[in-house]
Image (spheres, rainbow, N blue to C red):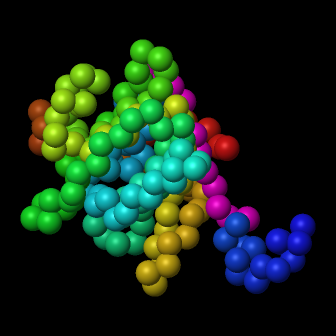
Amino acid sequence: MHFWHNLKAEEKAVIIMEKWYKIIPDVKYCSEILELFCDLHDYIIENIKYDYNANTIEVFFEYDTHREGVILRFKGIDEFHIIAPDRDAPYLSGAKIIVTTDNHFLWYNDDSELSKDEIKKTQWLTWIQAIDIHFAFVNIINGEKIIEALSEEQINPIWHVLNYDTMQYQDIQKHFTVYEI
């Protein structure tokens, strides 16, 4: 309680608004959940923080508009491989999460369908294998990063998508299931 009383009103507001979600170890769920953030296409890895004592890694991805982002928090790290960013092409083409045979997660920064062995042999990928993954949406206002709950519009968006067969745009209703922590 002492901690709460020492906070400023705006700090209390940020804590109350902050909302984290967990990713469940389901193959179909993992193949779809990053669609909430366009599979991290056109996001840049802004920073990676490793906490040895907590055995966690947090990765902050910023969208190319610089108005929003997402944090992936990996807990119970099994292994990881981080490469230096490509300064000529810093934005991701996409990312994937797969479920390993022991129900752990393996996230990697590429939009190709790769096996666990292929991922770990590829030297140009950043990848993290962990027991749990949590994520949070980040709103960026005047350079300040604020973690917020996903809106109803983000969870159930209507996408305006080009149908390549007809070359016509069509609206597609999406529904994402999220699990609050």
Q: Position of residue 117 (x, y in %)?
A: 24, 22
Q: 75 above or below 12?
A: above
Residue at the spot 39% in from the left edge and 35% down from the top edge: 79
- Nearest the viewer among 163 and 70 is 70
Q: Is 20 a magenta residue?
A: yes
Q: Is residue 107 above or below residue 154?
A: above
* Residue 12, horizontal then vertical, whole percent: 75, 74
**Residue 151 inside the magenta-drawn segment:** no
Q: Residue furthest front?
A: 53
Indicate the position of residue 38 as horizontal and vertical percent values: 33, 48
Which residue is depicted at the point 42% across and 15% down? 101
Residue, far right:
1
Q: Residue at x 65, y 61 (%)?
A: 18
Q: Quadrant of residue 14?
A: bottom right
| Region of the chain picked out in magenta, as a range | 16-27
* Residue 75 seen in this snapshot: yes
Q: From this viewpoint, is residue 176 visible?
A: no
* Quarter of the image with the C terminus in it: top right
Work out whether 24 lies above or below 61.
above
- The x, y position of residue 84, in whole percent, is 21, 57
* Residue at 47 percent of width and 26 percent of height: 104
Seen in the image, is 80 located left or right of residue 156? left
Q: Quadrant of residue 42?
A: bottom left
